[in-house]
Image: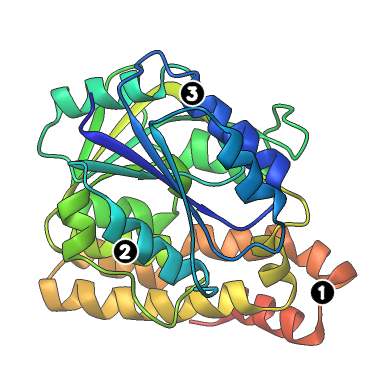
Amino acid sequence: MNRIEIVVPFWGEPGLLYETIRSVQAQSVQDWRLTVIDDCYPDPSVSEWFARLDDSRITYVRNEVNLGITENYREAIRRAHGEYLTILGCDDLLHPEYLEVVGRTIEAVPEADVVQPGVQVIDEHGRPVLPLVDRVKQRVLAPRGGAGIAVLRGERMATSLIRGDWLYWPSLTFRTDTLRRIDFRDGLPIIQDLALLMDIAFEGGGLAYNPTPAFSYRRHGGSASQKTLLDGRRFRDERTYYAEARALARAKGWNRTQRTARLRVMSRLHGVAELPGVLRHGTRAGLQSTLAHIFAF
């Protein structure tokens, strides 16, 4: 079980970070190592909190300069020593059995590059919620088949994810060597997680999905991702990547993946669902981007 290392790239609300750390400390499996990488968050109380924390398994480091989200993820990978790596969100929560569930999944599917456990969605106050986007993720897009582990590889994995990204990035555990071999794509900061996972699939990699609930993903109403919907960046980046994915699938002869990327039905429906909010609160660029996302081919 000590093959799994946890790294938390931090920039956010300190109180939520401390809840995240406590959720790691509460693991049923106690043989773990955690590193927190503070990306120059302007609050000295964070370093003071970790200085008082009496747990030799936890390391706190602060970047000399602000790296930004993608570079801080890369820093997390550079610092990793374990065979498997979880890049945990700084406001999300592990359930006590997270490492146990992921460890059992790795034992069952040792060739998997990525492990996705079951996820509960919570709001900024920690209350369970299930907005439309998560109902679609969990009830429509995620593989079904009871309590067993679903395994997707290569074209099947790529087609599933390009139909609609049903994964929860902060909850994933990766084979560390895979993350070192397949880097984040530059220029796609908002959907860098989908692009990386698709590249794993295009290389013939595999994903193991264990639906056993083991993680709480915190969805904020005023999150950075929500702001990118209102100003148009989210859907602009999605269209850019879907075009790239079509070209990659065409080159490999993956016709089903190519067709799914061209139609992008669930992505268009996401635009339809977000349109009322963009009309009320978004910018002109956000509205134009959303309409283009819905109607353009």
Residue occupied by mark 1: 282
Residue 15 sits above or below residue 2 on the image: below
> Which residue is at the far right?
280
Q: Residue at x 17, y 41 (%)?
A: 83
The amino acid type, in three-letter code, at marker 2 is: Leu
Q: Which of marks 1 and 2 is in front?
A: 2
Between the residue at mark 3 and the residue at mark 2, the CA separation in whole angstroms equals 29 Å
Q: Is residue 261 left or right of residue 54?
A: left
Dot 1 or dot 3: first in sequence order is 3
Residue occupied by mark 2: 196
Question: How far across and down, in percent of the image, does residue 120 sit?
Answer: 57, 29
Q: Nearer the viewer, residue 46 or 14?
A: 46
Q: Which residue is drawn at 54% across and 64% down?
A: 39
Q: Nearer the viewer, mark 3 or mark 2?
A: 3
Dot 3 or dot 2: first in sequence order is 3
The answer to whether any part of residue 135 appears in the image is: no
- Name the disc covering residue 50, or none: none
Q: Residue at x 60, y 59 (%)?
A: 269
Residue occupied by mark 3: 25
Between the residue at mark 1 and the residue at mark 2, the CA separation in whole angstroms equals 28 Å
The amino acid type, in three-letter code, at marker 1 is: Gly
Q: In the structure shown, which secondary structural element does the residue marked by tag 1 occupy? A: loop
The amino acid type, in three-letter code, at marker 3 is: Gln
Q: In which quarter of the image is the N terminus?
A: top left
**Whether label 1 touches label 3, CB < 8 Å:** no
**Based on the displayed image, in which of its 4 quarters is residue 18 positioned?**
top right
